[in-house]
Image (cartoon, grey):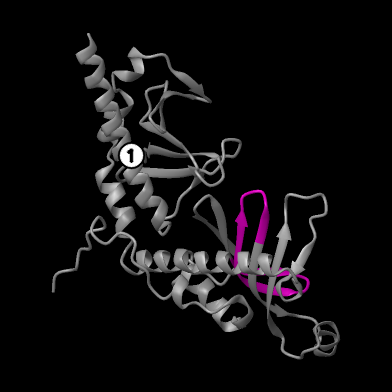
């Protein structure tokens, strides 16, 4: 039987296992559900301590697997919303004796869920357990984050279960030749360029399009996030290998002052958006070149 080939452009953002409209609220999560989420998203498939960082919008989502410290081990997710706050949803297996566990948490099981909220934008960056939060608005905001996380998880799981079709399509369609063609577009030599680190480019409508001066197959595309006002960027670059084919690396810089983070094959929304932005950049530069030609 022939393998089924999924057209990523036709059904790009399907969900599997998780979705905002059928998730349990934070207060009803149990330890096993949290562990299951961690297993479903784990691309490393190892029981040893490790972390995988994904991106939900401009917010990092860190998968925690088998985190170890003196108290025990933990599995779960940690979502950081910009520089504002951090939501942690983890299942913790404690190593401390059961009597002490009972005294500390008023219950006997060795495993329990730990959901915490941590402010990052104040001098008093205190951590609160979700169950102790009294402000209804804050609780609803965290519940909204959790629903968004479930949409992110659902899209990630669908991509993984279907051999990452969006990632495969990007690798296939944005080749070194296509990237170099954009890098060498005449607009970069006919206009005054704006410097952006090792890149130089220009704003075209609402996209900043820049290439690297050394002739490498690398394109920087930036845009202004309408919600936060931050200037975020995608970096498309071709990595040459000593053996095997070259491949595309796609990275995200969530804010101008931060570094670039490579995106994962399961970061579905970003892969879809990056492709759309790349095609828009191609179209915008062509329109700009045509306009300049007609004005001569």
Residue under numbered circle 1: 278
Residue at horizontal 65 percent and vertical 66 percent from the top: 88
* Residue bounds of the magenta highlight: 64-86
Q: Residue 86 at what x, y percent from top left?
A: 66, 59
Q: Quadrant of residue 186?
A: top left
Q: Residue 145 at what x, y percent from top left?
A: 57, 64
Q: Secondary structure at mark 1?
A: helix
Q: Is residue 189 magenta?
A: no
Q: Quadrant of residue 137?
A: bottom right
Q: Quadrant of residue 53?
A: bottom right
* Image quarter in which the N terminus is found: bottom left
- Viewer-nearest residue: 67 or 272: 272
Residue at horizontal 70 percent and vertical 64 percent from the top: 117
Q: Residue 273 at what x, y percent from top left?
A: 37, 48
Q: Residues within 10 Å of mark 1 (few under 14, many from 20)?
A: many
Q: Residue 4 at what x, y percent from top left?
A: 19, 68
Q: Residue furthest top?
A: 296
Q: Is residue 69 magenta?
A: yes
Please tell me how many numbered marks the rendered image carries.
1
- Viewer-nearest residue: 60 or 143: 143
Residue at horizontal 72 percent and vertical 86 percent from the top: 110
* Image quarter in which the C terminus is found: top left
């Amino acid at each position: 039987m022939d393998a089924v080939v999924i057209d990523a452009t036709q059904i790009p953002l399907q969900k599997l296992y998780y979705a905002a409209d059928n998730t349990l609220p934070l207060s009803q999560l149990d330890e096993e559900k949290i562990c299951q989420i961690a297993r479903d998203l784990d691309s490393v498939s190892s029981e040893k301590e490790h972390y995988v960082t994904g991106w939900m919008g401009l917010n990092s989502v860190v998968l925690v697997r088998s985190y170890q410290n003196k108290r025990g081990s933990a599995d779960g997710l940690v979502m950081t919303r910009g520089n504002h706050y951090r939501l942690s949803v983890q299942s913790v297996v404690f190593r401390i004796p059961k009597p002490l566990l009972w005294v500390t948490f008023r219950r006997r099981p060795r495993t329990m869920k730990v959901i915490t909220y941590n402010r990052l934008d104040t001098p008093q960056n205190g951590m609160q357990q979700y169950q102790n939060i009294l402000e209804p608005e804050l609780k609803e905001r965290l519940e909204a984050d959790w629903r968004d996380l479930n949409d992110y998880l659902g899209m990630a799981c669908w991509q993984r279960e279907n051999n990452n079709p969006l990632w495969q399509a990007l690798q296939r369609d944005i080749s070194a030749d296509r990237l170099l063609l954009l890098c060498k577009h005449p607009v970069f030599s006919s206009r005054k360029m704006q410097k952006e680190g090792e890149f130089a480019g220009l704003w075209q409508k609402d996209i900043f399009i820049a290439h690297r001066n050394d002739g490498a197959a690398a394109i920087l595309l930036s845009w202004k996030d309408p919600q936060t006002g931050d200037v975020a960027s995608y970096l498309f670059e071709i990595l040459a290998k000593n053996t095997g084919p070259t491949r595309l690396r796609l990275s995200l810089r969530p804010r101008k002052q931060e570094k670039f983070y490579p995106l994962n094959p399961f970061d579905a929304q970003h892969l879809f958006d990056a492709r759309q932005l790349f095609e828009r950049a191609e179209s915008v530069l062509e329109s700009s070149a045509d306009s300049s030609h007609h004005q001569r």
